[in-house]
Amino acid sequence: MLLLKDNIARNLTEERIRRETGFDAKIGKLEFSLFSPRVTLENVVMYNPPEFGGSVFLNAPDLHFEYDRSKLALGKLHLTFLRLTLEEFHIVENQHGRTNLIDVLHKVAPEILGS
């Protein structure tokens, strides 16, 4: 089971991104440590939903973060370190005048937009 933990976490993360954002996601590699609060992802690609054309929304070859375990235990994610290599990031407007960025923010962080 320990040998499969990263693959299981990758699949669960892809599915959770789809469920919570409506954006399809592919993660090439995900590694996390059971003994230290860090996660590394490689080749993360998110695709726009059909209403935004289905093209690439975000392409990040490298994403590494470290988090505060005590905050996570309280249900809050507090990053103590973040490294993001962003290769592509496309903001697209749909036929109703709404952008993919605002759409995803409404779904995952409505407090940012005051909703």
Image: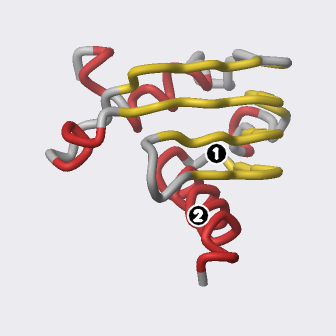
Counting from the top left corner in percent of width and height, residue 101 is at: 57, 21
Q: Residue at x 61, y 71 (%)?
A: 5
In front of the other: 106 or 46: 46
SS category of the residue bearing label 1: loop
Gap in angstroms between the C-alphas marked 2 and 1: 18 Å
Counting from the top left corner in percent of width and height, residue 29 is at: 78, 52
Q: Quadrant of the N terminus?
A: bottom right
Amino acid type indicated by mark 2: Ala
Give the class, few, some or many, for how many residues have Cα within 10 Å of label 1's Cα (few <14, many ≥20). many
Circle 1 residue: 23
In front of the other: 45 or 38: 38
Circle 2 residue: 9
Counting from the top left corner in percent of width and height, residue 39 is at: 57, 42
In screen coordinates, is 71 left or right of 104? left
Counting from the top left corner in percent of width and height, residue 91 is at: 70, 15
Label of residue 41 in the image: none
Q: Is residue 81 above or below residue 20?
A: above
The residue at the far front in this view is 35
Q: Is residue 113 above or below residue 14?
A: above
